[in-house]
Image: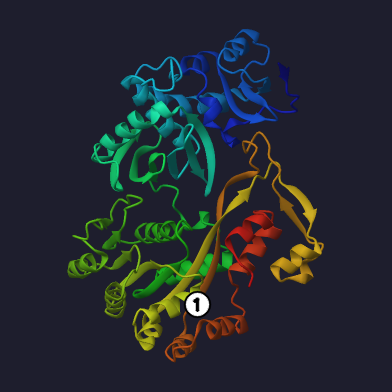
């Protein structure tokens, strides 16, 4: 055991905690002794400790962790809050849990008891909340069951479980989701809600599919609280934020956000709605699949997976309720597109999303759906494209000069020698080099000239040339700005944007 030299006490409020280590020790040990293992570094587990000289507490932790331990002197208040945040929910879900979950097996075919399976499931959910994961993947293989969490868009390994755990754990999750536990050959969908002390209600959508080694299940976690959904936290540059805020206060028209699945389109629209209802009284109705966040004061309609309530059917009915603002989760077909255009033409402000590679591509996408080009030009107010990239950890990002090859990759040879940053990894970011995500944006504000040009049905290349001539920044421009500011890395940009 060695102590890590520190010039100042570690602030646990600024640390990304790895639940794979934090949950190794019992809640009562962490609470009573004020110790918390929070990440691994070069094979050693870092232990946040209120008193680095308390050998008795450190030896108690060693009962549960075989790796070498490095003690990190920690600011007591932040350590107390971290322990409360991690273990209070676990105690509430699992009852009187004095020990961490430990499933014992006497052979490869041994069946764990039901209490252990319930505790294991709760531990996985709790770990996902600690890591702020968006998805849980439970995947059977020939040798074990792999549990992975999607954090900041990247899958992380959490645990590998014995094969004997698979069927009882899957049955437990199916029961919670309202699925048929006897059906193992056909895909199924379900849902349930968990309540936790700090995160309130978490809506969880589940999906199973049969594979060669058994059914795999994916669980999507939808946090229902929206306190942090504000426009200024999305990552828009000041000029784009002002333009967006101005446009959403227009009395009518179509505001459309585009991008691939998981790029944050819905989050942007939720933030826009919150901004509107915080400033004035409005009748706001949304149609979503699924409802990802619950917003007080907004009527939210969920599309039925059996198509009893489709986007089109719900939209036609919603228009009879005199909404000031409509949000349509996604335009998927011509009928929905036509109804949304008609709503925007008749005095409603319509927010929606569509799948396209760029903001200009959304224009041609609507045209391909059969919408007349002059209608697109008449109702459109602003189109946005966005992506999400991981943010570099400000504590450990490493500066270097952009090489010629990297500048050529971006198509910006003039940037050779510019200082940019790469991830390194430290105790604050759990060794990943990243903390959170930030949006990259591209905006097309419509005016009379652009509306006139769109009505002539130009192709995407022509629209992009027009925007370039008018010096509207695109996704690449915005990402390069964030790259130079040290907010993200070149590899992150390359993973979501093709310069050509």
The reply, left or right, for residue 278 in relation to residue 356 is: left
Residue 82, given in percent of the width and then of the height, sits at 52, 28
The number of callouts visible is: 1
- Asked if 263 appears above or below 381 in the picture, the reply is above
Q: Residue at x 55, y 86 (%)?
A: 462
The reply, left or right, for residue 423 in relation to residue 188 is: right
Q: Residue at x 32, y 51 (%)?
A: 295
Residue that extends furthest to the top in the rendered view of this protein: 56
Q: Nearer the viewer, residue 355 or 478?
A: 355
Which type of secondary structure does the marked residue at label 1 adopt?
helix
Color style of the picture: rainbow
Residue designated by label 1? 360
Residue 491, given in percent of the width and then of the height, sits at 66, 56
The reply, left or right, for residue 323 in relation to residue 18 is: left
Q: Residue at x 45, y 27 (%)?
A: 162
Q: Nearer the viewer, residue 367 or 138?
A: 138
Residue 224 appears in the picture as rendered: no
For the residue carrying disc 1, how many other residues have a C-alpha within 10 Å: few (<14), some (14-19), or many (20+)?
many
- Name the image quarter holding residue 337: bottom left
Residue 475, given in percent of the width and then of the height, sits at 58, 68
Q: Quadrant of the C terminus?
A: bottom right
Q: Nearer the viewer, residue 471 or 190?
A: 190
Q: Quadrant of the N terminus?
A: top right
Q: Nearer the viewer, residue 232 or 406?
A: 406
Residue 489 appears in the picture as rendered: yes
- Asked if 399 appears above or below 143 in the picture, the reply is below
């Amino acid at each position: 055991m060695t102590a890590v030299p520190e010039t100042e006490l570690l602030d646990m409020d600024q640390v990304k905690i790895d639940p794979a280590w934090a949950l190794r020790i019992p809640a009562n040990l962490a609470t009573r002794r004020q110790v918390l293992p929070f990440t691994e570094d070069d094979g050693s587990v870092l232990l946040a400790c209120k008193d680095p000289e308390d050998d008795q507490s450190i030896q108690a932790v060693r009962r549960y962790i075989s790796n070498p331990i490095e003690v990190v002197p920690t600011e007591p208040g932040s350590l107390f809050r971290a322990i409360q945040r991690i273990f209070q929910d676990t105690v509430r879900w699992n009852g009187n849990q004095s020990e961490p979950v430990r499933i014992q097996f006497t052979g490869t075919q041994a069946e764990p008891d039901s209490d252990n399976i319930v505790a294991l499931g709760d531990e996985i959910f709790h770990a996902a909340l600690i890591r702020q994961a968006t998805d849980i993947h439970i995947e059977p293989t020939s040798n074990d069951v792999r549990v992975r969490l999607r954090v900041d868009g990247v899958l992380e390994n959490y645990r590998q479980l014995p094969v004997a755990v698979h069927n009882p754990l899957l049955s437990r999750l199916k029961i919670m989701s309202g699925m048929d536990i006897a059906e193992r050959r056909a895909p199924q969908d379900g849902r349930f809600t968990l309540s936790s002390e700090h995160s309130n209600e978490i809506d969880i959508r589940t999906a199973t599919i049969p594979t060669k080694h058994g059914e795999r299940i994916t669980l999507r976690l939808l946090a229902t609280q929206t306190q942090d959904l504000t426009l200024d936290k999305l990552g828009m540059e000041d000029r784009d934020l002002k333009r967006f805020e101005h446009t959403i206060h227009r009395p009518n028209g179509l505001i459309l956000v585009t991008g691939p699945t998981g790029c944050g389109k819905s989050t942007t629209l939720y933030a826009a709605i919150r901004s509107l209802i915080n400033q004035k009284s409005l009748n706001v109705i949304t149609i979503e699949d699924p409802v990802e966040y619950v917003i007080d004061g907004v009527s939210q309609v969920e599309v039925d997976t059996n198509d009893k309530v489709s986007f089109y059917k719900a939209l036609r009915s919603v228009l009879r309720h005199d909404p000031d603002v409509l949000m349509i989760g996604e335009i998927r077909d011509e009928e929905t597109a036509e109804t949304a255009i008609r709503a925007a033409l008749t005095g409603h402000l319509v927010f929606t999303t569509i799948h396209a590679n760029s903001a200009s591509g959304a224009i041609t996408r609507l045209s391909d759906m059969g919408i007349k080009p002059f209608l697109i030009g008449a109702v459109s107010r602003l189109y946005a494209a966005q992506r999400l990239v991981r943010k570099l950890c400000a504590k450990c990002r490493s500066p270097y000069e952009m090489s010629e090859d990297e500048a050529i990759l971006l198509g910006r040879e003039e940037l050779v020698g510019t200082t940019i940053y790469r991830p390194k990894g430290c105790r604050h970011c759990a060794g990943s080099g990243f903390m959170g995500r930030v949006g990259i944006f591209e905006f097309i504000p419509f005016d009379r000239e652009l509306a006139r040009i769109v009505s002539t049905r130009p192709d995407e290349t022509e629209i992009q040339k027009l925007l370039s001539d008018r010096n509207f920044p695109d996704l690449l421009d915005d990402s390069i700005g964030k790259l130079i500011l040290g907010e993200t890395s070149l590899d992150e940009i390359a993973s979501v944007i093709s310069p050509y």
